[in-house]
Amino acid sequence: MPTRTTYPRINAVEARPAKTLFVRFDNGAGRIYDCTPLLADDAFRPLEDEAVFRLAHADAHGYAVIWNEDIDLAESEIWLNGRPVDDPAQPDE
C-alpha cells in the first residue's frame, strides 16, 4: 500500500514585493515562493492587483495560503517549489 507524503503546515505568510510570498512552516523552515508564473492562469489572474495579492494569509489548519474563497495555494506546492530561506529579512541570500 503506498504511503501518503505529508508536508509541514503553514504557520505564517507574508506577501512581499514582486509577487513573492515568505512562508514560515510549523517545522521552522521558511520558503520564498514566486507567484509570478501563476498569473498566467486565469484562476490566479486577480493576484495581479496588489491589494488582492496582499490579502494572502495561512489557512486556519495550515494546509494552504488563501487570498479569498476562490484563490488558494497548497502547502505542498510552496514546500516543493519555494526557495528555502532561513532569515525572512534576507530573502535573496
Image (tube, grey):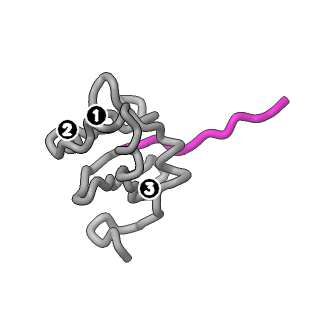
Q: Magenta residues, as a range?
A: 1-11
Q: Which residue is mark 3?
A: 28
Residue pictured at 70% horizontal, 34% vertical:
4
* Residue depicted at x 35% and y 44%: 39
What's under tag 1, amino acid-wise? Trp
Secondary structure predominantly adopted by residues drawn in magenta: loop
Residue topped by disc 1: 67
Q: Which mark is residue 14?
A: none
| Nearer to us in this view, 72 or 58 | 72
Nearer the camera: disc 3 or disc 1: 1
* Residue furthest out toward the right: 1
User: Which residue does the image show at 51% across and 54% down from the upper left?
Assistant: 81
Mark sitting earlier along the chain (3/1): 3
Crowd rating for badge 2 (residues with CA inside 10 Å; few <14, some 14–19, many 20+)? few
Across and down, in percent, residue 73 comes to 42, 37
* C-alpha gap between disc 3 and disc 1: 23 Å
Amino acid found under the numbered disc labelled 2? Val
Q: Which mark is in front, 2 or 3?
A: 2
Residue 11 relative to residue 2: left or right: left
Q: Do the CB atoms of the residues marked 1 and 2 lie less than 8 Å apart?
A: yes
- Quickly name the residue at label 2: 52
> Which comes before the other along the chain, label 1 or label 2?
2
